[in-house]
Structure formats: structure tokens, C-alpha cells
Amino acid sequence: MSEFNPKGDEQVKGQTPENSPVADPSPTNKMQLAAGKSTEQFRPTHLITSRVRLAKDICFQRMCILTASVSVLILVFLLGSILASGIPSLSWTLLTGFPEPEPENAGMWPALLGTLWVCSMCALITLPLGIGTAILIEEFTPRNRLAQKLASLIQLNISNLAGVPSVVYGILGLTAFVSMFSLFDDTGDSGAPSLEIGAVYYDQFSNLASDPFLASGDESARERYFLVPVDLRDDPTTVPTTGMVAYENQEAGLVPVEIIAIDPFAEDPSTSPDQLSRTIDETSTPGRISEKQWYYLRLPFGRGVIAGALTLMLVILPVIIISTQEALRAVPTTLRAGALGLGATPWQVVWNVTLPSAVPGIMTGSILAMSRAIGETAPILIIAGIVYIRSAPQHLMDDYTVMPLQIYNWTSRPQEEFHHIAAGGIVILLAILLTFNAVAVLIRHRMQNKLH
Amino acid sequence: MNETITEPPRGSDKNNRATHDLQNAPTEPTSRMDTHEAAQADVPRSIIEMKNLSSWYGSFQALNSISLNVRKNKITAFIGPSGCGKSTLLRWVNRMNDTIPTARATGSLHLGDLDLLGSGTDVVDLRRRVGIVFQKPNPFPKSIFDNVAFGPRLHMKLRRSELVDLVEWSLRKAAVWDEVKDRLNAPALGLSGGQQQRLCIARTIAVGPQVLLMDEPCSALDPGSTLAIEELMNELRDQYTIVIVTHNMQQASRCSDETAFFFEGSLIEMNDTKSIFTNPNSQKTEDYISGRFG
Amino acid sequence: MNSAVNRDRTLPQLEQQVQTLLARERRNLSWVRFRERGIFLCLVGCGLFSLLVTGSIIFVLASETAKFFQFSEVTLSNFFLSTQWTPLLGNTKSFGIWSLISGTFMVTAIAMLVALPLGLITAVYLSEYAPRRVRSTLKPILEILAGIPTVVYGFFALMTITPLLQWCYSGFNVYNAMSAGIAVGILCFPTVCSLAEDALRAVPTSLRDGAFGLGGTRFDATVKVIIPAALSGIISAFLLAITRAIGETMIVALAAGSRAQITVNPAEEAQTMTGYMVQIAGGDVSNFGIEYYSMYAVAFTLFAITLTLTMVGNYIRTKYRETYD
């Protein structure tokens, strides 16, 4: 059957008992149509049916073409409307600025860096996990029945996980990563971590020099801030006493200063500018500030970068597993058999033969999965909420925002100016995603060229 | 039928390849005309022994109680119509069937003293001792050199110069050295089909196996390459025991010493190649080799 | 390659050298086996992690939902029978999940009215009619559509579709189910199209040839032979699209509004399950209050619905798949 060429097909049909005059309905075959009409007078009944069928066929084809063009038009319309409102508001400020409350100064630099942080962390965690799972399912033949059951369970489970809405992963991330099932909340205050590494806490005092009532006007009595280290986040606030050593944050680092504590209402303060500059109101309440190292770690994770990365990991893990499985399946079995026949262990086969051949496919799949992670909004919105972020994350537990969340934030505001910068943000986001997709397509293209 | 037996059992132009003709195999065609008992007395002992070997894929029985011995430094051909179990049997000898989750076997299968079906058998070591060449040439998408060096790198710690020696030796043994010696770093996939298959043989012998299994090694090749592979098998028989599965009865009669005929999972007959092709004991064998089915 | 040196040697010399090499001690297999074991266990750990994810989703949703039902304001009958969903309304809190489900289903129904016919017909066109060139341009366009983040569709719905709808008929609310539904439909369209096309292309050419050989037109072949043969794949594509539409969040959060009500009027606001979750998580309700836990109950309902649909889809695909060799 498959050897039929269209012409041969027509000839055969012409000889069928029904003598259906219209064999090939494609409009390119106008000759055929004409031939059909010429035989019309002889076999009217059959021709009516076939004309109806032909009309149906042509209608259907036109409908198909119409529908396909509608879908293209929708895309053009969608991209066109966004570009039309987005491109005019593109500016350097939008890319490098901070999300100020005035639309004309607002930018998405922290969101851009937040996306970079979250997505690169997410890739670091997800890629080994996802590729490992795919290798386990595809490359390691289960030996006993239990292992077979387990393998098929994992396979089924992955296809089910792929159908879970991302917002549900957000809920899971909120419980499992942000608050960690409230396991560490012994203080009762849900915001406070119970375990911290890499954070130093200070109580910050300011001197009295800035007080116009006390200041002598002497310029050497400048305003200074002093830091008193405290051991724990929840220690009681320090009460300043005379002779206590506090630290001043200077260019050279923390410089110890002996401070003088007075009650400004009880006693006439010293007038010496030097003394005044390190005099502190002993009734003042200091601010508790913290300095966090780059390796700062706490449990529970809170709404930081790591919680976002782990939650996005849940979302794209099934995607990466499935695309890696496809890439591994595309490697010919004969290659595996060849390596096994030489006495390679299963892992040696994977490492030396299968993985090198599957790398382009895995990369393509992973890049597409990462572009999904970049655009994913709902789970991040659930776990991070809408917070005002002024700076890029400094450590893995730092607050952050991501580009799509910033766009959502701007879109959901009533002022129209924000809608314009949201459109500008969308253009930036789409540009990044298109670059990603282009790289993926390029890799796939190269891979196909290599195979042929 | 007559055409099959008029062909000499071996490639007659073997001596043309003087460079490789170092250890010409002692072949006395007359000795193989002897009775089976006599042959067993003066030829080397069996290296692979099977007793009542049965095998299943899930509930499908692929092999039904096979008992046969493969003799050392001989070429043994497995013939039979497709689906008769000959490839399955071959793949049990180096446990390639382990890759199929539903495959299982009962009975006994020994390589020398080693029990091949035992659960404690080290499959990795076994496969080093029993190399396999597949139907379709399957060089890795690496350079020619890396293809041959793949096995040795897995199994031995070698200096670069030793590795180079080993690769050269393997390629010479596989009679492909002269064609590739100037482009060892070129991708192996750029070679012709016949060269690729000889490269795969070189790759297999580079790990020093005792037995070479060949699963229809010529079915994807043109006649010229087939001839080259058959000549190569003749060269290799002195150092290796070769088991070849083939659809091609002429090939079996040309290059094997012994032939086993399988049908629907059972061993119908095994004997000297000449006896099988001139005077088969079983009607089925006769029908098959005379082309009445299969 | 330093074969220049080797080429001068005779084969017997090489033979001798290599034989000594081959006779040498093999690499210690116990280390290889140990490494193999370790790597295998790591991979098993990776595999088990995915099971752990499913397990913890169920555990988290179930345990937090249980906490929700322990509140005195909440009863099972209220949850399943009431038609009012007013969790933020001070004294008259009511948790009738049907309002949210009806909102979800309205948006999904509108989306499917857009995505299923459009997707299936475009898939038929791509697989049966389209010339190669059209196919090779349309496929990447579909991939681009599929790669656009959902927040962009949400923006599109709010900023473009809604004004268009209001221009057509002034009764449309600023936030309405219609606009969100159309955007979700556009979002699902590439999924339906590419999965349905895969299913159609998996039907072997011999079946088409058979239909043509009996004198069928291309329309006959498509409608009477190919679509029935690919039906299991098409249905599972539809189910997957429905699952995506039900779980879609950002579009409805932006365009569908935040009033939960049972209505069939697509011009009005309709809060979906996902929309409610975003409202609670993004808003400033107190953690660990009743509204917070109601989010888990909604998530559980959503998860149960989508998991059922996914499993049915997988079952149909594997069970009724016609295999052609």
C-alpha cells in the first residue's frame, strides 16, 4: 500500500466498481476535478455523493487553513499588542533601576538579579537530581520484581507530577521549605529562625551630637553610630553604660570606642566636642541590626532565595526528567550493547557512551525547562508574596523578587503608567526567554546535523 | 543443495594475505571427515558446555532444553530460521540477555569451569572474556583510536605507549590497520560498513577475550566486506573460539567447523559442518538447508 | 599518534608485547564494583526523591486541611454543600467550595471552547494537509506560544482582551471570566495542538493509503480513519489541556477578579481555586489563621481534581493506545 504514488492511486480508483470520479481531492489537482465533471452526465447518483464529499473535503481543508491562520494571527496580535505598549517604555532605567514607587523611575534590576540567583540555584539542584532519576529509569534494568515495581511506580509518579499545577508546588514549598513544617519554630514567632549560621547581631546606638538641644554647634561633634555586639537574635536590648566599649563602623572596619552614657535630662552634659560625640542617651532604645555573611544559613529557610529555588525545582523536576528520558531513549541501543559486550559496567556504559551521545538532547531539554522556571510566577508568588525589594540578594536566605513577579506586581496596580512599565518588563523577559529558546533550537539543530 | 556443498568449507584465498599469515591454522580437512567420536578424541576439548538450557522472555519460551558443546579454537555456526532462538542462545553465553528484564534461563551453561547462569557470576569479567560482535556495526561516536582503546581503558591501567601498541595490534589482527593507520583520530562513523564491523572486531579483541560471539556479523554488509570478515574469522580461529550466528547457509558452510541447526527453540542437529551440509540426520535440517523453508 | 615508531616493527614483536600486556593483572574489580554500587544508590536516591515529593504533597495538603476543618467556623457540610465562599467577611464567614469550583469550571470551559477545536483542527491541518514549509514554520511558532510565561498571558487578558470585550458589549466587568477564559484557551492551544498532532502522526501511512485506496477523500480518511485511530492520544491531549486550564493561576489572578460566586454569566467576576490561593498568599492575612488554612483545603481540592484528570489521561493513553509496528 505504501508504495502507491498519487497517480497510480487515481488510476486504481478510476477502475473501482463505483467509478468514483473524484479520487484525489487536493485542490492542486484541478485536472482531476475537471475530469470528474465531464463524467457527470453518465453516472449522476454517484456523482452527487462524490460532489458532496468533495465539497465537504474542500470545506474542511479551508476550515483547517482558516483555523491555522487564526492561531498565527492570535500570536501576532498577542506579541504585537505587548510590543506596542512595551517598547516605548523600554529604557535604561527600567533595566537597571530599582522598583521605585514612581513609575518613571522604576526598574527591575533587583528582579533581574533575583531571577538569576533563583534560577541558577534551581538549575544546580535540579539538573543532577533530574538527570539522575532519568538515568535510573532508562539505563538500569531492574533485576527483581520489587525493583521492577519500583521503577514503574517512579515512572507513573513522574507523569503524575508533571500534571500537578505549579501553584500546588508553591503551597508545598511554603510548608516544606519556608516554614519547614513549623518544626523549628520553638520561639512561637514564625518569622524568627531557630537555627542560624553566619549572622552577627548588633544593637545600634546613635550619639547625642546630632541633638540640636545638646549639640554645641561644634563641627567636630558629628553624628556617629555605635554597634554593640549581642550574642543572639533574641537577647534583651543592651542598656548603654559609661565605659562600655562599642564599635564604630569605619572604612578600616569596626573601631572600638569607649562610650559615655548619660541621662540627658538629669545632668548637664559635657560640652567637650570629643566627649559629646561619643555620648549616648542611656534611656535610648537601640535598633537591632544584623550582619550576614555570604554563607548565612538558617532553618527554617524563610522566604529566601533557597526556598524559591527549591520550589521551582519541584516544578521543573518532572520536565527535566521527561526530556532527559527522551534524550537517553534516542541513543541507539546498539551502542549500549557494544559497550556492555566489552565488559563495561552499567555506569561505565552511561558515563562513557550514553551520556556523551545524549548531552545535546539533555541540554536542549534543560534549557527549555529553565526557561519555564524563569517564567514561572505562581509558586514564587505563593512562597515569597509581594515584597518591596531594594537590592539584589546577598546570600541564599535573602529576600528576593523575580521578573515575572515584578511584572505581576506592576500589572495588578491600578495606575496606567505601571501597566506600561509592566509591558516593558514583559519585553525584557520575553527577550531573555527567546534567547534561551534560540540557544536550545541551535543546539538541537547542530545535533541533527551531526547525526546526518 | 548441490551448490552449497561444492563450495570449499573455507575461504581458499586465505594465503593471499601474507602479512597476517603468521600462524597458519593447522587444518586437515580429512580429519573433520572422521566420525564424531574420533574428532572429539584429537581436537581440543569443549570450552562452552550447555545442558538442558531453556530460556524464557516473560511467558514466551525462546529456548527449549538445549544441550551442546562448543569446542575450543573452532568456529561453530548456529543456523536456523529467524526466531528459532539462535541469537538468544548466543546472548546467554555472555549474559547480554541481562539487559532484558523479562529474560530468564534454567539448566546449566558453563564456560570452562565458570557457571554462567549462577547469580554470583561476575558479568563484567565474563563479558571481557567472551566478546560479542553484533549484526549492525556499532562503533561509538568517537575516534577510531578511542573506539579500540575503550575496552582496555576500562580494564587495565596502561601507559600511553602500551595503549598505542595494543590498538595497533588489535587493528592489525582485525585486518583493518592498513586502511585506518593514517587516520586513527578520525571519527569511526566515517568508515565504511565493512571497516566499521572490522573495527568492532578489533575493539572486541583488544580486551583479550577467549571466545568471540558473532551475531550475524555480515548481514548488514555488502559481499566484499562479508568476504573480508570471513577471511578475518579464519585468521582469528587459532587464538579464539568463535561462535557465529548466521542466516546465510553458504557462510556457515564456507567458514565454520561445526554447525548447529535450531528450529523453534530446539536444537535439531549439531555436527561437523560438512556432515550437516552433505548428510543431515534430520529431515528438518535437510529441508532448511535445501531452502524449503526459512 | 606516535604510530611512526610502531610502523617499523614486525607483527611478531608487537604480538609478543601485546600478549604480555593482555596477560597482565586486570584492574581491581572490587573498586569498580564498589563505585558502581555507590553511584547506583545515589541514582536510586534521586528516583526515590520524586516519590518523596508526591508523598509530601499529599501529607502537607492532608494535614493542613485537617487543621482547617478543626476550626469551629468550618464544617464539612458547609464546605461541600454551601454555595457561599466568603472567608474574609468578618462575622459571616462561609466556606462553600462550590463557588470556587464553579468559577474554575467556567474559566476552564471557556478556555476549552477556544483551545480544543482550534487545537485539534490546527493539528489535523499540520499533520494531514499542510505542506512541509508551512509545517516547519508553524511548529516553531507554536513552540514560542508554549514558551511564553503565563503572567504575559494574564497581562494580555487584562490589557487587551478585556477592553476588546468591553468594546463589543459594555456589560463586561473589568475583571471577568470570559477574558481570563480566552487567555487560558490561547495558553492551552499549543499544548493541545502539538500533542494531538503527535497522536495523528503516529497513525501509520498504510492506514491513510488504505482509506485512499478505497476511494476516500482526504476528509474521509481523516475523519473516518485517522482521528478514530488516534483517538486515545487526542483524548489524553484534551485531558492534559483541561488539567492545565484548571491549574492555571496567573491569568485568573490578574483577569478573573476576586469575587467567588456561582454564576453562568461570563461577563462577571469569577474567582477560581487558584485565584483564591494567590489572593491569600499575596495578601496580608495572618499566618495560621483560618483563611490561611482554607488555602490548603482549596489546594487539596485542586490537587485531587487535577491528579484524577492526569491519571485518567495516562490510563487512556496507555490502555487504549493502538500500537502499530
Image (tube, grey):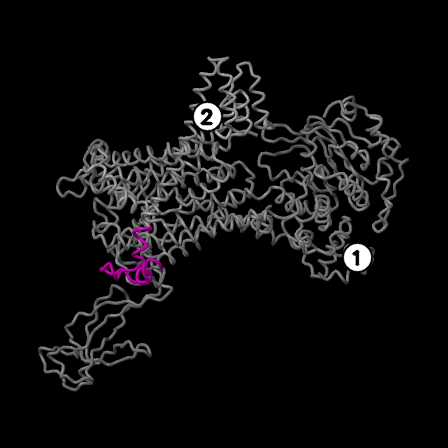
Distance from the alpha carbon under mark 1 to that under mark 2: 70 Å
User: At 39% across and 42% down in the image, what residue appears?
Assistant: C54
Does A365 sit left or right of B26 as displayed? Answer: left
Q: Chain of mark 1?
A: C
Q: Quadrant of the N terminus of chain A?
A: top right
Q: Is A89 included in the stretch rendered in magenta?
A: yes
In-front residue for pair C78/A32:
A32
- The numbered mark, 1 or 2, whose residue comes first in the sequence reads 1
The region drawn magenta spans: A83-112
| Callout 2 amino acid | Phe
Mark 1: few/some/many CA within 10 Å (<14, 14-19, 20+): some
Q: Which residue is mark 2?
A: C219
Residue at the image point whose x is 29% and y is 79% from the top = A255
A383 lies left or right of B155: left
- Is residue A381 shown left or right of residue C211? left
Q: Nearer the viewer, residue A285 or B235?
A: B235
The residue that appears at 80% across and 46% down in the rendered structure is B239
The relative height of residue B37 versus residue A365 in the rendered view (above or below) is above
> Is residue B112 highlighted in magenta?
no
Is B159 rendered above or below residue B133?
below
Q: Chain of mark 2?
A: C
Q: Can you tell which of label 1 and label 2 is closer to the viewer?
A: 2
| Label placed on residue C14 | 1
Residue A29 in percent (x, y) is at 51, 28
**Position above or below: B182 against A139:** below
Residue A398 visible in the picture: no
Judge left or right: residue B127 versus residue A27.
right
